[in-house]
Each structure stands twice: as structure tokens, then as C-alpha cells.
């Protein structure tokens, strides 16, 4: 998964689990960038009576680095407060919720949005309401209307939404974590000989599950540093983005009289930049540590990027399919291509007309060159598919990041840094076999982009095969 339950400790704390991050130039407003951070993953739609929500005791933040040092220059901080309308009811709602002011809605969340730039914090809005969870057709009969009511345009130019959405990440977890099985390889032949067979069609394990999303659309001049020009290869055009969740250092459990209390400084417990970085690159013994560190410390993990475990496993799992990758591994050559893709960005000259480097500091950030306009015909393979507006240049909701990552690890991107290397034929075809069409809830054409959350009445999870 992109970052769902990716480390032992955060798997026990889903409310603070950063599960997916998206950053892209907004197609309908190319003078803005849209940032979406997901939390509280793997939500069963019928999860009442205590439906899913953000944590009042968690500080959620989206960070932007615009000078390449691995530290945030701009941060958008979300802090939540939950209120109960009827303390004598066990129900989430006692009738239809047709507006955010409905008296039938018993448990509401509000949030304060703060922008921190150059060390100074400014509250942009306070007591903004979240929509309810999508309970069902009787409780939330017009859910898109509630989302419209919970979408705000601020006087400072930002557009913001916080609430439940359908999980748009697609991955065949049941296969991938069964020793790296890739079901489409069941038809793979090399020199006329069938080398591997795995029965069945790919299954999107996260389909029909929900998440909670923070979405903010920001004018470019509020995320980029000041510069004389913003060309395709100018460093000032590229920003690095990551998200985090923090909790206060001390929690004291209350008794029959006193409530639980928290004290001390906020300590980061989760973060996410590039999809799959902590999931696939960082070893299990260091995943919890990685979640507590800022991107500026990621040089500690550069060795795992240079020699990723999965690159060594592929030739073993698929004998004879990746002979050139196997030879590269045996030569103990570091993967400079992956370091560029994940830790520094691509410098000019590696891909024609494209660069998204942020400099020499090795930091896991989702890098976005804001000078590249949105694509009129997006390719789900992003830069690997010739679409420079897609992953790893930021990440759009429909980008097939799992396939892109697998093909990169399989050696397809090695020629970016070593023209003498010819990737194995399978490197260009390796895939779990899923796409955005395997997400039941369609993505939206505009803000907040992720689809309408699945409702609990239909309980589609109970009917999944």
C-alpha cells in the first residue's frame, strides 16, 4: 500500500496514519497547486455507530519545501475539535442530514487551519465544519451537496476541504504481499517458454473502502519561493511536498472523575512523501524511526535506495525473467536512478524537457515542477509514459504509482544514469495489473478530486469476492 499501516507502531494508530499524498498543478486552475493528504485508512463504510473521524489529539500538517533543504518553508496545519449535540443519544444522527447545520446530526467535527511560513503562523480560518461520514441514503440523502457546503474558498486565495472520501489508491495487496506475486505475469513467456503462472485476476484490495482527506488548493505564489523566472528547468519552479501527523509527548489516562489529558511538545508519529518509500524501501527495523524524522535526515536511508531489497528479490522470485537486473545486483552497483527519482529529483538532461531536482540534499519528498502545465491527455504511467505532468513529477489521483515504482525498481530507469544498460524486456511490462478503472467510486473532475465515499447502507465490502 502507498503508506497504509506501513510501520509496526503506526499500524496501531490509524487516526494518525498518513496513507496517501497527492500534489499536482490544478487542471482547471493552472495558477494553483492541489495538495491532498489522506489519513485513517481502510475504513469499512458501515463502521457505525462510531463512524470514522479525524483525531482531536492529532496535529495534521502538509509541508512544502521550496529551497531544497529538506525543511518546510510553508506548512498548512489542520487541528480538529469534536462536538456532541445530544449527549443522551447513542446515534450518530437521529434523522436525515441535509445540511451541515442539521439538528439531526449528533457528532460534528470542526477544524482550524493555520498557515506557517518563514517561522510565522497565521490562522486562516477557524471552526470550519467537516461533512458527516456517508452513512447511507436515508441519513445522508444528498452527500455531494454536503461536500459542496464543506468546501471553502478563503480570503487569502486557498480552497480547502476536510472530510471523508473514497480511497483512490489501487493495489493488489493479496498478491503483492504473497511473496511478490504479480498476477499478470501468468501469461509471461521468454523465448517461448512459460516461466511463471499465478492464477486469478488482479484484485484492488482497497476498493470500496474510505479514508479521511485534507485537501487544499493553493496559489502558486504562496508555495514557490520568489524568483526572476519559473522555467521548466529552473530550480525555483520545483517544490517538495510531504505530510505528517504528530501527537503530544505525554498522555495521561483519566479515571471516573477526570478526563484523559495530553501534555508536552508535539512529536511526529507519521509522515509521507513519495508513495511506497517507507512501505517498500525502509527495512522493518527502521520504519518507526523513519516516521519520526524530517526529510532532511533521509541520507540515513540512502543506502536502502541505492540497493533496494525488492530489486534483489525480483530475480529470485521470477527466475530467468530479470537476468540483466540480476547481473547489475551482483556487480553491487548503486542505483543512482532511484536516488534521483526518490531523494533529489531528476536534474536537467536525463529526460528531455524535464527536471524536478531540488538540489543535493537527499530527502524523501514528492517533488512537483509547477512550470509543467497539466496534461490534456493524462497517461497513468506519468513520466515513464511520456506525460511530464504525472508521477514522479508530483502525483495525480489517477497515476499508477505502483506500476511506475515496480518498473523503476526492475531496472527500467537505470538508463537515465547509465546509457550502456539495457533493461530486461520484462521491466517495461511488470505491473500488478490495476488502474484507476478498478476504483469503483470515480474520481471527480475538480476539487477535492477523490470520489464520493462509499455509504454504509449498501455495505459493498460485504459483497466483495
Image (cartoon, rainbow, N blue to C red):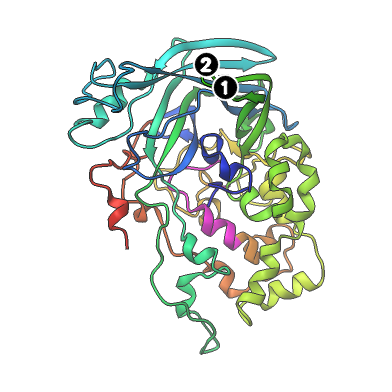
* Residue 348 visible within the image: no
According to the picture, the residue beneath numbered tag 2 turns out to be 257
Query: Residue 453: where, in percent of width, then height?
Result: 33, 39
Residue visible at 62% across and 16% down?
Answer: 116
- Near mark 1 (Cα within 10 A), the count class, few <14, some 14-19 or many ≥20, is few
Residue 397, horizontal then vertical, whole percent: 44, 43
Left or right: residue 165 compared with residue 382: left
Question: What percent of the width, then of the height, locates residue 43?
Answer: 41, 43
Dot 1 and dot 2 residues touching (CB under 8 Å): yes
The answer to if 110 sits in the magenta stretch is no
In magenta stretch: residue 393? yes
Residue situated in front as seen by the camera: 85 or 126: 85
Residue 303 locus on image (x, y percent)? 79, 54
Q: Which residue is drawn at the image coordinates 59% and 23% (left, top)? A: 223
Q: Which mark is residue 52?
A: none
Q: Tell me where the magenta segment starts and ends, as one range.
A: 391-407
Whole-angstrom CA distance, mark 1 to mark 2, is 7 Å
Q: Secondary structure at mark 1?
A: loop
Residue 167 falls in image quadrant: top left
Task: Check the image and name the residue furthest to the front.
Answer: 256
* Badge 2: residue crowd in 10 Å (few <14, some 14–19, many ≥20): few
Which of pointers 1 and 2 indicates the residue nearer the eye? 2
| In this picture, residue 122 sits left or right of residue 315 | left
In this view of the protein, can residue 195 be seen by the observer? yes
* Relative height, residue 8 to residue 450 (above, below): below
Q: Quadrant of the C terminus?
A: bottom left
Q: Please tell me whether residue 250 is drawn above or below residue 392 in the rendered image.
A: above
- Residue 260 occupies quadrant: top right
Front-most of residues 258 and 60? 258
Looking at the image, residue 22 sits to the left or right of residue 456; the answer is: right
The foreground one among 39 and 82 is 82
Find residue 254 and name its label. Answer: 1
Amino acid at each position: 500500500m502507498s503508506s497504509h499501516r506501513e510501520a509496526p507502531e503506526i499500524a496501531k494508530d490509524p487516526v494518525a496514519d498518513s496513507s496517501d499524498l497527492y500534489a499536482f498543478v490544478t487542471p482547471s486552475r493552472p495558477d494553483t497547486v492541489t495538495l491532498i493528504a489522506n489519513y485513517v485508512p481502510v475504513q469499512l463504510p458501515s463502521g457505525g455507530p462510531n463512524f470514522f473521524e479525524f483525531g482531536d489529539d492529532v496535529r495534521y500538517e502538509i509541508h512544502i519545501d521550496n529551497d531544497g533543504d529538506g525543511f518546510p518553508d510553508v506548512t498548512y496545519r489542520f487541528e480538529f475539535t469534536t462536538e456532541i449535540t445530544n449527549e443522551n443519544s447513542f446515534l450518530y444522527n437521529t434523522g436525515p442530514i441535509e445540511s451541515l447545520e442539521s439538528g439531526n446530526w449528533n457528532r460534528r467535527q470542526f477544524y482550524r487551519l493555520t498557515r506557517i511560513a518563514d517561522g510565522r503562523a497565521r490562522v486562516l480560518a477557524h471552526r470550519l465544519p467537516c461533512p458527516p461520514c456517508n452513512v447511507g441514503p436515508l441519513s445522508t440523502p444528498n452527500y455531494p451537496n454536503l461536500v459542496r457546503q464543506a468546501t471553502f474558498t478563503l480570503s487569502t486565495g486557498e480552497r480547502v476541504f476536510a472530510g471523508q472520501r473514497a480511497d483512490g489508491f489501487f493495489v493488489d495487496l493479496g498478491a503483492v504481499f504473497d511473496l511478490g506475486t504479480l498476477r499478470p505475469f501468468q501469461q509471461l513467456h521468454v523465448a517461448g517458454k512459460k516461466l511463471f503462472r499465478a492464477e486469478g485476476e488482479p484484485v484492488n484490495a482497497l476498493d470500496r473502502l474510505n479514508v479521511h482527506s485534507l485537501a487544499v488548493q493553493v496559489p502558486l505564489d504562496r508555495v514557490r519561493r520568489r524568483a526572476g523566472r519559473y522555467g521548466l528547468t529552473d530550480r525555483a519552479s520545483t517544490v517538495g511536498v510531504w505530510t505528517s501527523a504528530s501527537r503530544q509527548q505525554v498522555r495521561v489516562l483519566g479515571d471516573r472523575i477526570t478526563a484523559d489529558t495530553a501534555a508536552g511538545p508535539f512529536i511526529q508519529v507519521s509522515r509521507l512523501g513519495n508513495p511506497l518509500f517507507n512501505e517498500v524501501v525502509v527495512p522493518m527495523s527502521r520504519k518507526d524511526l523513519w516516521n519520526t524524522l524530517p526529510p532532511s535526515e533521509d541520507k540515513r536511508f540512502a543506502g536502502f535506495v541505492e540497493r533496494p531489497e525488492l530489486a534483489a528479490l525480483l530475480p529470485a522470485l521470477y527466475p530467468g525473467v530479470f537476468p540483466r537486473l540480476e547481473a547489475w545486483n551482483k556487480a553491487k552497483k548503486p542505483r543512482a536512478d532511484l536516488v534521483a527519482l526518490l531523494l533529489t529529483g531528476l536534474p536537467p538532461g536525463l529526460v528531455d524537457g524535464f527536471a524536478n531536482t531540488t538540489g543535493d540534499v537527499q530527502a524523501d519528498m514528492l517533488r512537483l515542477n509547477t512550470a509543467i502545465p497539466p496534461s490534456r491527455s493524462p497517461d497513468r504511467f506519468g513520466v515513464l509514459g511520456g506525460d511530464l505532468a504525472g508521477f514522479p513529477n508530483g502525483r495525480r489521483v489517477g497515476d499508477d504509482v505502483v506500476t511506475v515504482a515496480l518498473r523503476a525498481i526492475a531496472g527500467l530507469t537505470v538508463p537515465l544514469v547509465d546509457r550502456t544498460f539495457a533493461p530486461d524486456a520484462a521491466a517495461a511490462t511488470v505491473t500488478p495489473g490495476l488502474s484507476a478503472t478498478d476504483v469503483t467510486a470515480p474520481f471527480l473532475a475538480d476539487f477535492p478530486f477523490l470520489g464520493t465515499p462509499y455509504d454504509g447502507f449498501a455495505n459493498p465490502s460485504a459483497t466483495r469476492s
